[in-house]
Image (cartoon, grey):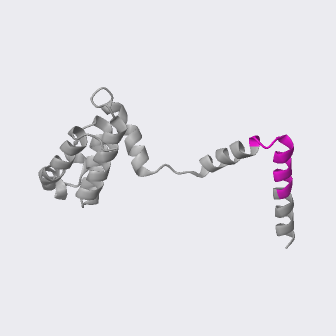
């Protein structure tokens, strides 16, 4: 009970201190606190790593990278192959899978994986973006 009262008092004093400093700082401070707890989304991180490889090749590198991610995630069922494919795209900007990125038991599936992803990859790269 004492802990709750102390916590409430500390929280109230922080809110009042923020109000005393000015209303404009409180939203900024809360945004900074929220950003400390925000974990990047895997897709966003993928696009961040992929886009620099697409600069100069495509008018909208983020859109191409996002499209490649979405199709790879939807098309490739095996998690090891999907992760290797996403790694290859994010590191090179093109669908790539190094054999040492997948278990030896799945290396024979690399070719069929490229066959599955070929058409969606071409669509991401060459079809116009719909607005």
**Residue 47 in view (yes/no):** yes
85 displayed left or right of 11: left
85 displayed left or right of 112: right
> Which residue sits at x=16%, y=53%?
116
Q: Position of residue 103 (x, y in %)?
A: 23, 55
**Residue 97 in view (yes/no):** no
Q: How many marks?
A: 0
Question: Is residue 79 depicted above or below 30 in this figure?
Answer: below
Task: Out of 27 and 115, give the one closest to the viewer.
Answer: 27
Task: Out of 129 and 89, give the one closest to the viewer.
Answer: 129
Residue 94 included in the magenta stretch of the image = no
> Which residue sits at x=28%, y=35%?
92
Quarter assignment of residue 64: top left
Residue farthest toward the bottom in the current orientation of the protein: 1
Residue farthest toward the top in the current orientation of the protein: 56
Q: Position of residue 33 (x, y in %)?
A: 66, 48
Q: Position of residue 50 (x, y in %)?
A: 34, 38
Q: Quadrant of the C terminus?
A: top left
Quarter assignment of residue 25: top right
Query: Which stretch appears magenta?
Result: 12-25
21 displayed left or right of 50: right
Q: Quadrant of the N terminus?
A: bottom right
Residue 15 included in the magenta stretch of the image = yes
Task: Out of 106 and 53, give the one closest to the viewer.
Answer: 53
Q: Position of residue 83 (x, y in %)?
A: 30, 52
Main structural element of the magenta stretch: helix, strand or loop? helix
Quarter assignment of residue 121: top left
> Which residue sits at x=38%, y=38%?
49
């Amino acid at each position: 009970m004492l802990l709750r009262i102390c916590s409430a008092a500390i929280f109230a004093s922080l809110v009042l201190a923020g109000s005393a400093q000015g209303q404009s700082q409180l939203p900024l401070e809360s945004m900074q606190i929220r950003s400390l707890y925000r974990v990047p989304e895997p897709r966003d991180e993928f696009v961040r790593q992929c886009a620099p490889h697409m600069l100069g090749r495509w008018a909208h590198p983020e859109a191409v990278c996002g499209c490649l991610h979405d199709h790879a995630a939807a098309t490739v069922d095996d998690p090891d192959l999907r992760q290797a494919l996403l790694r290859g795209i994010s590191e090179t900007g093109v669908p790539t899978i190094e054999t040492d990125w997948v278990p030896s038991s799945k290396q024979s599936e690399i070719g069929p994986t490229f066959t599955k992803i070929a058409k969606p990859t071409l669509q991401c790269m060459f079809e116009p973006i719909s607005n």
